[in-house]
Image: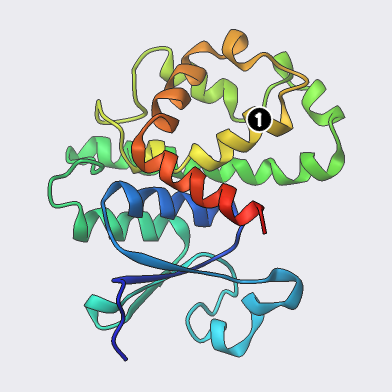
């Protein structure tokens, strides 16, 4: 079967890990089609999907121009995209030592898994945190107060991987309990530089369109 787009991305309308892949696809100018799985219907656990991703989670990416190669887990997807298609090394960490630092930064956003339980537990969790912030904000602030980007002296997939998590936290989860611009100025500046990029604006427009339905 021929495909008009190079990639098919299996994702979810609100799942942050799927959106961080979209940010990188857009930034690299790669063509893709998104298939939004409906969790309430357990589409992510269906035999059709678990043939692609045995883990039964999103996201999963099919590269139709590479023999319908399938890859899943968001960090692995980001590495695949830059290793194979970031020919100008715009989002790629080229220094070997910094490459491992970038990997550590991406895995640090696994700390965002801490983030889901507080939402269910209620706002008290955020009030108990220093300055009422999200769990990973202090760590990011300590790094970004010393440098403009997380690693490599330029925006890389390490930075892009945080956009959806930070955006939700800043605008919804912690907005009533912390003044992000005042309490985390370096993080706030870094986030604003990321969300002002044309690729990120395009993704936000896609999200807004989906939320209208």
Residue 77 seen in this snapshot: yes
Residue corresponding to mark 1: 171
- Give the residue at the far left of this rendering: 88
Q: Which residue is found at the position 30% from the left and 33% from the top?
A: 155
Q: In the rendering, at what x and y percent does residue 39 appear?
A: 70, 70
Which quadrant is the N terminus positioned in?
bottom left
Which quadrant is the C terminus positioned in?
bottom right
Within 10 Å of the Cα at label 1, are there few (<14), some (14-19), or many (20+) other Cα atoms? few
Q: In the rendering, at what x and y percent does residue 18 appear?
A: 51, 57
Asked whether 40 or 17 is in front, the reply is: 40
Circle 1 — which element? Answer: helix
Q: In the rendering, at what x and y percent does residue 63 appear?
A: 31, 73
**Quick check: 105 left or right of 7?**
right
Q: Which residue is found at the position 38% from the left and 60% from the top?
A: 77
**Quick check: 49 left or right of 64?**
right
Count of numbered circles in the view:
1
Q: Which residue is found at the position 65% from the left and 52% from the top?
A: 211
Residue 14 seen in this snapshot: no
């Amino acid at each position: 079967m021929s495909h008009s787009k190079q990639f098919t991305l299996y994702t979810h309308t609100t799942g942050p890990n799927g959106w961080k892949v979209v940010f990188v696809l857009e930034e690299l100018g790669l063509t893709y089609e998104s298939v939004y799985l409906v969790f309430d219907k357990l589409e992510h656990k269906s035999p059709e999907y678990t043939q692609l991703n045995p883990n039964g989670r999103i996201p999963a990416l099919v590269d139709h121009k590479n023999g319908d190669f399938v890859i899943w887990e968001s960090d692995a997807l980001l590495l695949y995209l830059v290793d194979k298609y970031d020919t100008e090394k715009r989002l790629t960490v080229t220094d070997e030592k910094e490459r491992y630092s970038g990997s550590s930064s991406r895995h640090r956003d696994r700390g965002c898994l801490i983030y889901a339980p507080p939402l269910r537990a209620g706002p008290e969790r955020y009030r108990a945190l220093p300055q009422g912030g999200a769990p990973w904000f202090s760590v990011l602030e300590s790094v970004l107060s010393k440098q403009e980007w997380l690693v490599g002296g330029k925006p890389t997939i390490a930075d892009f991987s945080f956009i959806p998590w930070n955006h939700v936290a800043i605008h919804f989860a912690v907005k009533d309990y912390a003044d992000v611009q005042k309490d985390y100025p370096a993080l706030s500046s870094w986030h604003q530089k990321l969300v002002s990029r044309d690729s990120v604006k395009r993704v936000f427009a896609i999200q807004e369109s989906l939320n209208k339905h």
